Image (cartoon, rainbow, N blue to C red):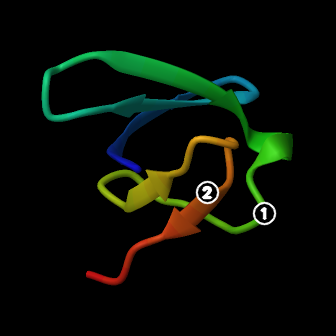
Amino acid sequence: MKKLKVDRFDGTMVIFIDKEKKFFAIEKAEIPFELKKGDFVEIDGEGNLTLLKK
């Protein structure tokens, strides 16, 4: 699993960043929960997202 942090929102996309400073973009419509800047999620090998508790 990969841990990602919400970096910003860009139109219909959520832009995430990982610990290696690589960026990932996922459409908001594909995310099954509300996110805000600074939230952390985990993504598994099948693309399933899990919101991590702070």
Q: Which secondary structure, mark 1?
A: loop
Farthest residue to the bottom: give it: 53
Residue drawn at x 75%, y 41% is: 28
Q: Is residue 16 above or below residue 20?
A: below
Residue neighbourhood size for the residue with mark 2, other residues' Cα within 10 Å, grouped as few (<14), some (14–19), many (≥20): some
Q: Residues within 10 Å of mark 1 (few under 14, many from 20)?
A: few
Dot 2 falls on a residue whose secondary structure is strand
The residue positioned farthest toward the front in the image shown: 45
Camera-side residue of 3 and 1: 1
Task: Please state the horizontal and vertical placement of residue 14, each as a whole percent of the image.
Answer: 58, 34
In the rendering, at what x and y percent does residue 18 appear? 26, 33
Query: Residue 32: which numbered mark, if any?
Result: 1
Of mark 1 and mark 2, the one earlier in the sequence is: 1
The type of residue carrying mark 2 is Leu
Instruction: Report the residue at 54% width, 50% height from top.
Output: 44
Is 49 or 45 nearer to us in this picture?
A: 45
Mark closer to the observer (1, 2)? 2
In this view, which residue lies farthest toward the left?
20
Above-or-below relation of 22 to 31: above
Relative horizontal placement of residue 36, taking residue 46 as reference (left or right): left
Find residue 4 and report its horizontal and vertical position in percent.
35, 44
* Residue for point 29% across, 55% down: 38
Residue 7 marker:
none
Image quadrant of residue 2?
top left
Disc 1 to disc 2: CB gap under 8 Å: yes
Q: Is residue 16 above or below residue 44?
A: above
Q: Which residue is mark 2?
A: 49
| Separation of marks 1 and 2 at Cα, in angstroms | 8 Å
| Image coords of residue 26 (percent x, y) | 65, 30
As shown in the figure, which amino acid type bears the numbered disc 1? Answer: Pro
Residue 11: image quadrant is: top right
Check the picture and name the quadrant holding the C terminus.
bottom left
